[in-house]
Amino acid sequence: MEESLQVVCPHCNVANRVLPARLLEGGNCGKCKRALFTGHPLALDGASFERHVAASDIPLVVDFWAPWCAPCRMMAPHFEKAAAQLEPKVRLAKLNTEDEQAIAARYGIRSIPTLLMFRRGRELARQSGAMDEAALIRWVRSQV
């Protein structure tokens, strides 16, 4: 029997069980009934960051960024396009380091943009610096 994966809803942050064979179908949240995958990066705050990092069985790539950061703004449209190509196998999310300074400090974010990849609460990989869409996708796929 196939073991299900936990996928956290991007809307209500509730963990849902999805069979790996049905992951490509996307599915809807059991609580809020909205789509589990939107094809867009998820904007995280402190509480949703903790929930998605701790409870997700699919890799979560978090872009640590700030509004004043020119390379962050330059990378944003590439990150958006990469999300559409990588979901549902990988979820992309953004965390504003100005709003969530404690989380940025906990993970030792010294330069932005910095990407961290998590799975089941553990950091799997880290990459600093802006990348275009192709480089982002290559980096993510090389890590999973």
Image: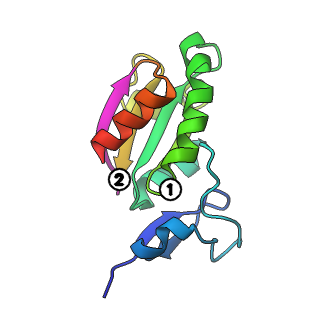
Q: Which residue type carries mark 2?
A: Arg
Count of numbered circles on the image: 2
Residue 119's disc is 2
Relative to 73, residue 79 above or below: below
Q: Which mark is on residue 51?
A: 1
Quarter of the image for residue 109 reads top left
x and y, in percent, of residue 111 in the image: 42, 16
x 49%, y 65%: residue = 7
Magenta part of the protein: which range?
Answer: 120-128
Query: In this picture, is 54 found above or below 81?
Result: below
Q: Amino acid at mark 1?
A: Arg
Q: Nearer the viewer, residue 42 or 143?
A: 143
- Residue 23 tag number: none
Which residue is at 39% across, 17% downward?
110
- Tag 1 secondary structure: helix
Element type at marker 2?
Answer: strand
Snapshot quadrant of residue 30? bottom right
Mark toward the start of the polypeptide (1 vs 2): 1
Residue 142 location in percent, x, y? 29, 40
Residue occupying image coordinates x 59% and y 37% = 81
